[in-house]
Image: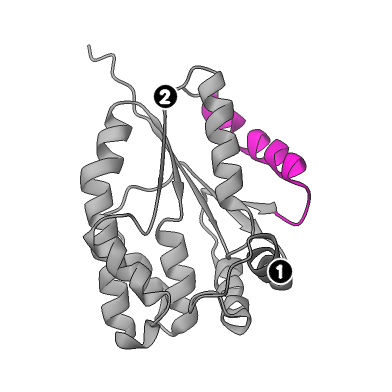
Amino acid sequence: MSTARKGLLIVFEGTDGTGKSTQLQLLAEALQKKGLPVLTTREPTEGKYGQKIRKLYSNRDTVSLEEELDLFIADRKEHVDTVLMKALTEGKVVLCDRYFLSTVAYQGAAGLDPAYILARNDFAPTPDLALLFYAPIQTGVQRITESRGEQLNDFEEEIYLQKVAAQFKQLELPYIRRIDASGSIDVIHHHVLEMIQPLLEML
């Protein structure tokens, strides 16, 4: 009998500036202290398609919406084939910063049909848990421009992010858990730990 166990796929989703990347790192550290094998990853990836997507941050008008979606799908297929499936088969806890729900929300906000986007992602492993972080858009924008000292890219303009947030709000899938990201880092981390506890008990 095989002793191999399936890993866990926990994805971190939400509009820009909600602190999901910070929370992913905090969770990774907490799980590693428990002795669990953890892999942290993100989308868009650093692969050839992911790099093309990152170029769109400053010049999104160079492609059509369908071409943009094709890039995200190609990047995700490569990510699934070369990283995610291998780690999950090895029994690792995979923490992914953005996944297909972000594509649904961001490309849906740009005008594509969310159901169509979901259907295009049917090859991707279903998350065991999707933590969807939400906060007032103005809070997120302030964190990007003031706390990080960054300029907003073409995916981070406030009016667009309002539309993205509306798309996220409409998502109703059994593995989604919503977390209010307007509190302190420690309070949010505590909520994250509460959300993942039932999954850890299954390992």
Residue sitting at 27 percent across and 70 percent down? 71
Residue topped by disc 1: 142
Q: Tell me the kind of residue under disc 2.
A: Pro
Q: Which residue is mark 2?
A: 37
- Residue at image coords 36%, 76%: 56
> Furthest residue to the front?
149
Image position of 69 with respect to 82: above or below:
below
Residue 99 position in % (x across, y down): 41, 56
**Image spot of residue 73 (x, y percent):** 28, 65
Determine if the magenta segment contains residue 130: no
Q: Quadrant of residue 149?
A: bottom right
Q: Quadrant of residue 166?
A: bottom right
Pick the front one: 53 or 199: 53
Q: Main secondary structure of the magenta part?
A: helix
Nearer to me, 87 or 129: 87
Asked if residue 120 shows in the view, the reply is: no
Q: Nearer the viewer, mark 2 or mark 1?
A: 1
**In percent of the image, x 70 and y 66: which residue is there?**
146
Residue 58 image offset from top left, x and y in percent? 42, 78
Type of the residue with mark 1: Gln
Around disc 2, counting alpha carbons within 10 Å, would you say few (fewer than 14), some (14 to 19), or many (20 or more)? some
Image coordinates of residue 130 in percent, x first then y, are 52, 49
